[in-house]
Amino acid sequence: MSCLIRRVACVGVGLAVALASSAVLAADEKTSVTETDKLQFSQKEVQALMQELQERMFHLAELTKQVEPDNSTRLLLALKKAREQLIVEEMKEILEKLSTRDLSKASNDTKEVIAKLQELKNLLIATDLELQLQLERLRQLQAAIQQLDHAIKDEKKQQGDSAKMADLQKKGTDPKQQALDKAKQDQAANRKRTEGVGQIVKSLGQLEPALQSLTSGGQSMSSAEGSLGSGKPSDAEVQQGDAVKKLADARALLEKERQKVLQELEQQVRKVVIANLQEMLDRQTGIRKATQALSPRLATHREAVIQLQQLAPPEQRVATNCQQTLDLVNETEFSVALPPALETLQRNMLLVSGDLTGGRGDERVINTEIAIEADLKDLLDTFKETPSGTGQSGECQGCKGNLNKLLAELKVVRMMQLRVNKGTADADGEAHRVAAATAELPKDLREKIGKLRDGEASTRDAMERLHERFGK
């Protein structure tokens, strides 16, 4: 079974490679008609492969449901993600753009599809299935809560509109039929949205009280529709108020479940964070050693420059690992201080990658690599040494009984502040170096660097968020 799982993953990798080739051709404004035809043919092949991949995942999941339930669940989860992300549909849109020679847009869309295929591949070969399942549950809960927030907001607005029409009736003026019809339509739309939330909650399972509240709220909305249809906005106002209460009850229950999932995820995420930090540290150390070995020969040996430039892709892979860790930490709310620390690390990794691409391996670049290693080691030691769990609150009245976690957060903030203080020593020289390194990077990575906050702002924001979470 594991062999077949890898085979399905390889199909995904092949799709990514084919699409990457399409992106390169599409980005070339001088692409000829013949090349465009080839590109369309390649895209059709990729689309057919993706459809085959989805069918294979489904059939394989059904075949292994009894003997290998974990792998069957993994395949169904991947299939669900592929369908939710509309990968096949996006491939069709890319093909349409190619047929109209909208190559630039096709190239951008292709990059998005490649990223989604990479997510599928990671899911299919992931060893931490329990983590993936919990993450998927968390995402579904967050999606349900987000939609529910919109439904509550709209229901309150509709309740206010009904109140205004009811007030007119009390004053002897009937509301216009057009206004009643629109209010009824809006109410029907919000009821359907609520029913959609109910479908998500039902698929999650073990959330019957929340589902009951949603069902009851939907029934109140349906009654409000009837009242508006019969010209009784005062009755609709009461029914909409009841719907708001039921939706709020459901939201509270979903948020409680979300917090429960976050707590269950914490230990698993901690292990992944530590493993990723260790992997990044090992790879970064290797790149730094190679840079140091090549540095003395860069001025006189062209071969040394070429070898140094070959270190740029590995450095970008370290930055990618850093981004994946950052995404996981943000999604699971694992830490307040760690995300800005990882953002700073990723920024420096990308700058080093730019320097290496430009054939620069001088003392300044090496010092940046050493600083990245030091930060990774400090973060690794912090999360290794700090005991897991909430720990004893002791005299810490403001940390809500989670002293261990607060101490870890403060250690990370202290590390960030020390790096900021050190980095201000040569601001002018650093600005020149950043500009030179950034110029060597692809456009998407240059934009990423531009979006990252400066260290001082990140440190300040981390302290404010820590105060919100742990302070009084």
Image (cartoon, rainbow, N blue to C red):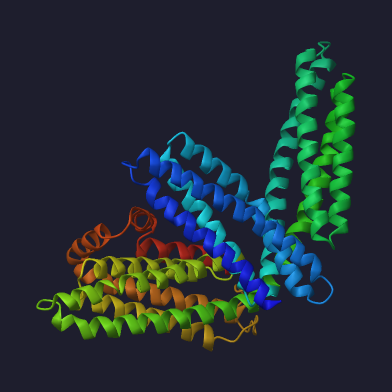
Left or right of 108, for residue 285: left
> For the point 33% across and 46% down, which residue is it?
28
| In the rendered image, the vertical position of residue 110 relative to residue 1, given as above or below | above
| In the rendered image, the vertical position of residue 76 relative to residue 200, given as above or below | below
Which image quarter: residue 285?
bottom left
Q: Can residue 74 be seen in this view?
A: yes
- 217 and 468: which is toward the camera: 217
- 355 and 56: which is toward the camera: 56
Q: What x and y, as percent, mark residue 373?
A: 36, 81
Which image quarter: residue 436?
bottom left
Q: What x and y, as percent, mark residue 10?
A: 57, 68
Position of the C terminus by quadrant: bottom right
Which image quarter: residue 451?
bottom left
Number of numbered labels in the structure image: 0
Left or right of 231, for residue 438: left
> For the point 61% across and 51% down, which residue is it?
48
Q: Can residue 337 be seen in this view?
A: no
- 7 and 126: which is toward the camera: 7
Residue at the limit of the structure toward the bottom, as seen here: 385
| In the rendered image, the vertical position of residue 79 relative to residue 415, given as above or below | above
> For the point 42% across and 36% down, which residue is it?
101
| In the rendered image, the vertical position of residue 38 relative to residue 173, given as above or below | below
Residue at the limit of the structure toward the left, as seen here: 300
Residue at the limit of the structure toward the top, as seen here: 173
Q: What x and y, as percent, mark residue 238?
A: 86, 33
Left or right of 411, for residue 228: right
Position of the N terminus by quadrant: bottom right
Left or right of 105, for residue 186: right
> For the point 77% across and 55% down, which residue is it?
252
Q: What x and y, as percent, mark residue 205?
A: 83, 61
